[in-house]
Amino acid sequence: MTVTTQDQRRGVLDVAAIVAIAAAVLVAFATPPEATQGNVARLFNIHVPSILVAYLCFGLTLIGGTAYLVTRRLRFDHLAVAAAEVGVVFTGLTMLVGMIWAKPIWGVYWTWSARLILTAVMFFGYLGYLALRRAIDDPIARARRAAVFGIISIGIIPIVHFSVLWWRDVHQPPTLLRPDEMQIDGPLLAAFLAGLVASTLVAAALIVRRYRLAAREAELDSLLASADVPVAGDAVTAPTLDGAP
């Protein structure tokens, strides 16, 4: 067994992600507490980077799906599904951390805020994207229909992001991607950027691994579709009585 250049690159990416996580944790606890929310506001360094990375992943799903429809190359479909799965994971992480943050600040884990509801819609929408893929056996039909689904689903992202501006409720307005100006002090910004870099590297490492798995799954499907490849169980025959024809 030999180590390929691709394996080495994946290993470097994995190590970079681990180092970035450690650095982000150190920077987050080295910064002073937030003026109004105290130490609980440190969850900002996980909560916001997670949703931004989820946006990025779903954008890659859009790119992969569009590229597949144009080129009909399954490698772009592999990218789309890999990014979608990682995006769902980071969206779920966003919701979980947000609920933990909400309890001491709002007094409840969940409230019917427009941002929360729309984020949940996005989460279950991309779960539907993954469910659609599971429901279709033919790889070509699966890639085509999933590509259309992924292109349509991207429309939820600007609605989620600007929901706190369009429907003012208990959720605070955006701190970073604001139409006017960014509202965060330097040390807290450094901690956020460290968390964003770490989250991005973790997502990249996961996407690379999932892309490789999708490619292997496609190779396996192709082999199983071939008439020349034996299938498990072919060597098993029905039992017969001694001397029976």
Image: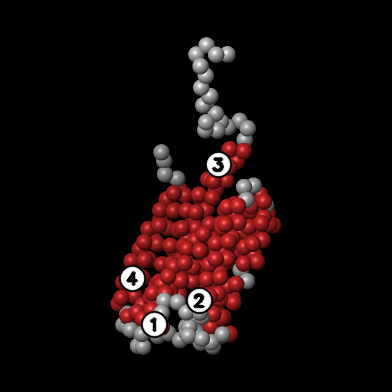
Residue 25: numbered disc: 4
Front position among marks 3 and 4: 3
- Residue occupying image coordinates x 45% and y 45%: 4
Where residue 50 sits: x, y (%)?
46, 70
In the image, what residue type sits under mark 3?
Leu
Compared across the picture, whether 138 is left or right of 241 comes to right
Front position among marks 3 and 1: 1
Q: Residues within 10 Å of mark 1 (few under 14, many from 20)?
A: few
Residue 44 seen anywhere in this rendered image of the structure: no
Gap in angstroms between the C-alphas marked 4 and 1: 26 Å
Above or below, comparing residue 81 to residue 34 in the picture: above
Above or below, comparing residue 31 to residue 139 in the picture: below
Compared across the picture, whether 5 is left or right of 157 comes to left
In the image, what residue type sits under mark 2?
Leu
Where residue 214 sits: x, y (%)?
54, 50
Q: Is 205 in front, or is 140?
A: 140
Where residue 167 sits: x, y (%)?
56, 85
Q: Secondary structure at mark 1?
A: loop
Residue 220: numbered disc: 3
Q: Are marks 2 and 4 in contact (CB under 8 Å)?
A: no
- Residue occupying image coordinates x 50% and y 13%: 242
Compared across the picture, whether 56 is left or right of 22 comes to right
In the image, what residue type sits under mark 4?
Val
Residue picked out by circle 2:
116
